[in-house]
Amino acid sequence: MLRRLAVGSNVLLHLRFDAAAGEAGRRPVRYKRLPDSMQPKPLEETFTPFPLPKYDEDLGYGPVRLRNIPDIEKAKKRQQQRGAELMEAALQESEDATDQTHLRLKEEGSMLASSSHDVSSSSLGVTEAGEDEDTLGGYTVSRHYPLSDRLECNRSLEDLLLQFVRRPHVEARCAALADMASTISIRSDAELVRMFEEVSSPFAYDGRGLNFLVTTVKKFGRPYGVSNALVTAYVNLMNAATVTFLQEQPGRLSRCPALTIQLLHFMALIKVFEPNKWFTFSNHASSNRADYKHPRGTNRTTAFWGTGEEIFDAMVDLVRSGGHGGVPYLLESCTDEQLVDLLNGFSAVMPNGTPLGGVFNSIMEYFLQRVRSHAKRKLTAQDFATVERMYLTSVMADASSEELLQLLLADSSCPRGPNFFAALSRGQATALNEKTLDMLQKAIDVASANHDTAALLALLESGSETLLSMTNKDLAQDFAMRNHFDYHILRSFQHFALVAERLRTEQSSISARIPCSLRDVQAQLVAANTTRLHSMDAHTAASPASMPHYVSPHPTCRFSRPLMTMLSQLEYLNSIDSVFLLHSSLVSTSTDQLVSAVRRLPSGKDSLIVSLSCLRELSVKAATSAKPKERETCDRALEIIAYEVEKGRVVLLPFSEELRLHDAGTYCDEDLIVWTIAAFFAREMPLVKLHTLMHSDCTARTPYRFLKGRHNLLVSSRSLYDKDAPLLSALYSKELKLVTRNVKLRTALRDRKCTLYHYNPIRARFVYRRDKAMFDRYHTTARHLAPGFSRGALHHDWRGLGVYTPDHPQVAYRSLPWKSREATLKVT
């Protein structure tokens, strides 16, 4: 049988596959040489054909529990005899060291001598003796042994903090927190301040504190979340601080204000007085596992812990004035800045953000005494900055100090800072409009003259809050346009420099298209269309210049579409089917839904509106979020939005138009701006479908429940259609809830992340178990076990944590090469 095979254009290869060809015809035909990796490897004489664990420098061949298997014993002997020339010289020393090591371990009662390994003098070499010595590095057996059989940590705080930061897995952080808790009493004040600052890093100010829910159990009626060990570790740290500062070293907090302030801020970040948030999966369904218990066993292990209550009461006693009327020693030892930080801490700890009355009065009275004493000399700019911070703190606590306000208004020696204008926007003072604008103008001019970009952006942010809270909208808009608020704020966002330039260039044409009034928009649009039609005479209508776009010839060069702003494109927005309002919470985890929304825009049926407040929140998260994934996602979202705005497909709501739209005359943030836009569309353009793009856990998703403030001016359920009522007065009306849809755009289906290195209970059953009885001779029971890792799961790393592991000796921690390669790939 002859087959013809064409190879190339001029070569014809004849291959014979018949049986008569003999041995030559049976060989496989190869067109190129096999690579070396596929070539058969020559076996050494010492090859052992069984699944021996990979040799490790720390553990040898690992925790092999099978004894008297000839192949394994031979392999061990070969490994021990490698480099026999070097070993012979140190053999006597190794035996002496072995005896001393065993004697010391027996005296101290250490359990870290691996019971599962052969401890005979013949198999215990110099390397293993050195490993046993390193086992207790950083830890010592308790001096009260055998009454207390535990290890005591003597590691430095620097070492523990490095472990906490560089090894973010649960086991490593729990061990670091346990070591910190056990050594609080021997740390200095500076070390404790740094310690509480570092362990607070995983928490956000608007988070849920010790919310480490890892799985949900759905077996017994109502599903509930199960937390990991970090909750216990942080609670133990708080309890250890309570014991140390109240029983062992009771005067320490009063002597060190910095430590008291840092401890207060740590308690505020972990939400020590809102423990229900620790077990809450969604803001829309809060848990009661921390303050409800039933005799049949419900919430038996989670309710009524009372974490931090005792030490907080002690700190309150340190601040409150005694019966003799003297100033507490803690307040006397505080600087002016520390007094503000102390009051901020007491405010942040409380669930409602308002400090206890006695605490506020005590701190504020002493601060005012200091200010009056400083007023005898000329106050510096730094002193006024501290006074502004204290005034903002008092306003946020709903107890604004009139004395501080008058002092700040009367001074003209230095420009006011951003904290002052932020306080005015949140306060009740409405008669300060013109003077406020004069002071803001002076501060902006000074920052611009000094080329202080950071101070200028801070003033623009707090100034925008002040302008939004003013009732005189014409005055506020003139001020914003004169100082180029839109340009400077947009330019400060990443990827938006070109958009800011184009917005400043096209500002005149954009302003010409904005209607005079935002009431009765439909009537204004009809009148504008009628006027445009009547102005066209017959000759003009027949001219080629006025032909429709689809009739006119295609332009020779591509033209750039103008930027689309909301109030200048009301006619376009009135003609489309649906509008999507973007909220910054949507892109906290991924940009998939944003990309899905952007892909719908070329259809001409949908439009996406992005406010400047949303862009500011995205910019802040991209720069300051504690989660690297969120920083990366927000930066990507800014890049996508900037590109689409520049191409004229996304509608932008700049700050100058936010001023015209927000008519409630109160403080306004991103949540309220989104619902102001929604109420405007529902009232003025009712035929346009309204969709909000928010995260499912965002509180702004249900404004009638969470957005409470001075903007709530509801007088009837039909406030949405009352033309004289502000737009935000419709937040609690049923109509706005009915016409607004919180949608979740469909995204591409994707595979789940790799779970190979997660703890798997099914795989864990086979860690110490033989798979098949046929392989008893050669099968090692530790084949699935990664030494030093919990049950073989590489994401549960117990190496070098000083934890008693009876199955194998302590493994020294070394960074895994594949982990470092993964980190390098992520960075690149």
Image (spheres, rainbow, N blue to C red):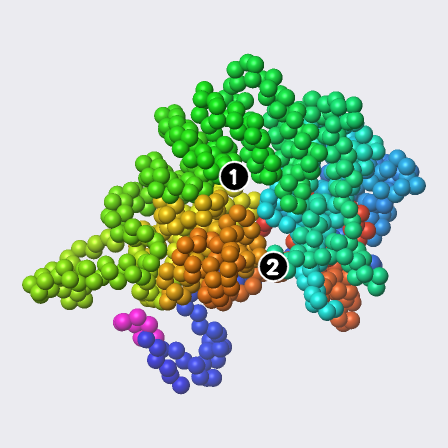
The amino acid sitting under disc 1 is: Gln
- In the image shown, does 643 or 407 lie closer to the viewer? 407
Which residue is labeled 2 in the image? 284
> What percent of the width, then of the height, locates residue 751?
53, 65
Q: Residue at x 48, y 47 (%)?
A: 669
- In the image shown, does 756 or 412 lie closer to the viewer? 412
Q: Residue at x 90, y 39 (%)?
A: 145
Q: Which residue is drawn at 40% across and 33% down?
A: 434
Dots 2, 1 in contact, CB < 8 A? no
**Which SS class for mark 2?**
loop
Magenta span covers which residues? 7-13
- In the image shown, does 248 or 265 lie closer to the viewer? 265
Q: Which residue lies furthest to the left in this view?
A: 539
> What percent of the width, then of the height, locates residue 368?
62, 24
Q: Which residue is drawn at 72% across and 42% down?
A: 177
Quadrant of the frame with the N terminus = bottom left
Q: In this view, does 117 lie above or below 131?
A: below
Q: Which label belongs to residue 135?
A: none
**Does 554 lie within the magenta span?**
no
Q: Which label belongs to residue 428?
A: 1
Mark 2 or 1, which is nearer the eye? 1
Query: Where is residue 131, by image quadrant?
Result: top right
> What percent of the width, then of the height, locates residue 666?
48, 45
Q: Which residue lies furthest to the right in this view?
A: 147
